[in-house]
Image (cartoon, grey):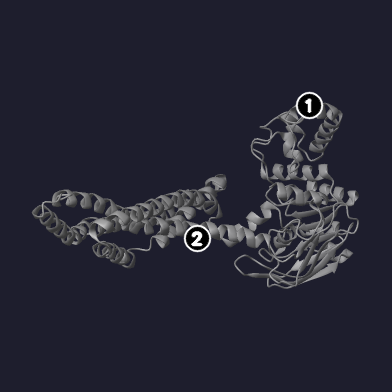
Amino acid sequence: ADAAMAEDGEGGGAGGARGDDAARLSAAAALLDAPEQRATEDASRLAAELAAAYQAVFKPVVEVVGLSAVLGRMMGWRQLAQCYAYFLAAGTWSRLVGPRFSALTVDAAEAEGGYRGHASRLAEYSEEVDVMGGGRAEAGVLRKAWRTLQSAVSRLQVHKAVSDAVDGYTLRHMGTLVAFTTMVPAVYNASADATAAAGAGASPGQTPTQYFLACLHLLVNVGLACRDLVLSHKTVATAAGLADRVVGYTEALEEAAHRPPQLHVAAAGDPDAAIAFHDVDIATPSGAVLAQGLSFRVRRGQRLFVSGPNGSGKTAISRVARGLWAPSNSAARVDVPALQDCVFLPQRAYIVPGLTLRAQLAYPTPVDDDGDDDVAAAAASASAVSAADDKMLAVLRRVGLGSLAAAPADLSSRVACEGLSAGERQRLAIARLLLRAPAFAVLDEATSAVPEAFEAWFFEACVDAGTTLVTVSHRAALARYHTHGLTFDGSGQWRSYEMTASTASIGSGGRE
């Protein structure tokens, strides 16, 4: 995050926007299923499985090496090798006929990610679902996702239980029988040696019973260690399945961070900065072509109106310009101003839960509302804070949200933005833009929920302020506030033109 902030703060270089964490996460989400599941639950389970795998492999290996040295001298290496040969053969058979735990683990993780995704989506759009009466349909979707998750987890657990039972019988009970069998020659030889020593009047050393019990104790420990070592492949396979998902997530992040330098960010305050696309092919993450060879340039003082049918690629322009999507062709080049000089307003205005109204208006610039900054520095900037508060109050009144704060103290409220309608949220986002007064603004249906009178006032204010605009909208009446137009036809073709009196007046009746 610090690196991303540093790059945004510098505002220059070919890869400034590409290094932004939000852009990388968005690009990774477009390439993967359930990225949140991979980054949290899968990563946590992977850490636990790796720890278990280390214990399941390292400890048995040490025990087998140490006990083998003792047993080799007592039983003979040949008999010990026969014992180990059985464990090797049994372990190989277990892996060949047993289930693929890595694939089963991946299936269960994917099912869990799908269920979590449906639940998160329902929580986010609960009001819309309730208004439309979609409870039954959503319940069906959730039940289906739950059954998929239940089936995947049950399949994993059943296979694991059956495999544990078979492996336990094969490796523990049969392994003990094999160990006893390999001990017979050694016990017989020890008994014969003890009888010969007694007949010669020498000390017999260990009796056959003592020898048998000593070997038995060591063999039991070796057998348990061999069993744990053979069964460790299940833990390793589970960790491998989770690692595949986590590595896929990190690789997607790396891919998003190391794409060709097609996005070029101007230095902050650069008078020659512009929003320009050069021979850009745009495609959705699924591969659907939205535009081919898109080329245009919006210089300071110009305003571009982007129109076209739904799904034609209008919103893709803001995504490419922000670095959320990359052009699908390597020869493309996209020039954008520094983030300090350009504001992006999406259709769905974002409100941060728990922030004060002052912090909401200043977003994304951090505001110290908790007194964490240096006291002396805070005192020195008291007059500046007071001026900023007065400006915020004035802007709130301009956008029709004066009821949220009548005095500077009201800006410290953390509940002022609760329950705002879609139109009021868009007004708040417009207030942010007016406060920042950027040289460039990219508006993606940013006024779709406000009345046309307020919309007209806002665009007239942008024209009067000399703000360079790229406006995506279905309202053809907004064309009159722009100097150039760009139209998509929905089949990957596009047309750019300079606004005239006739083109600016087409469809001035309002919504498309």
Q: Number of callouts in the render?
A: 2
- Which residue has dot 2 on it? 244
Horizontal and vertical percent position of residue 161 = 30, 54
Q: Earlier in the sequence, mark 2 or mark 1?
A: 2
The three-letter amino acid code for the residue at tag 1 is Val
Quick one: SS at disc 1?
helix
Horizontal and vertical percent position of residue 207 = 14, 50
In the picture, measured across the screen, residue 153 lies left or right of residue 384, that is: left
Q: Residue at point 81% right, 33% down?
A: 393
Mark identifier at residue 375: 1
Quick one: SS at disc 2?
helix
The furthest residue to the front: 201
Give me the C-alpha separation between circle 2 and circle 1: 49 Å
The furthest residue to the left: 199
Which image quarter is the C terminus in?
bottom right
In the picture, measured across the screen, residue 468 lies left or right of residue 220, that is: right
Residue neighbourhood size for the residue with mark 1, other residues' Cα within 10 Å, grouped as few (<14), some (14–19), many (≥20): few
Mark 2 and mark 1 in contact? Answer it, CB < 8 Å.
Answer: no
Mark identifier at residue 438: none
Q: Quadrant of residue 353?
A: top right
Residue 509 visible at all = no
In the picture, measured across the screen, residue 203 lies left or right of residue 392, that is: left
Considering depth in this image, is 110 or 424 the residue closer to the camera?
110
Q: Residue at point 32% right, 58% down?
A: 159
For residue 411, above or below residue 493: above
Considering depth in this image, is 23 or 105 the residue closer to the camera?
105
Horizontal and vertical percent position of residue 36 = 55, 51
The three-letter amino acid code for the residue at tag 2 is Asp
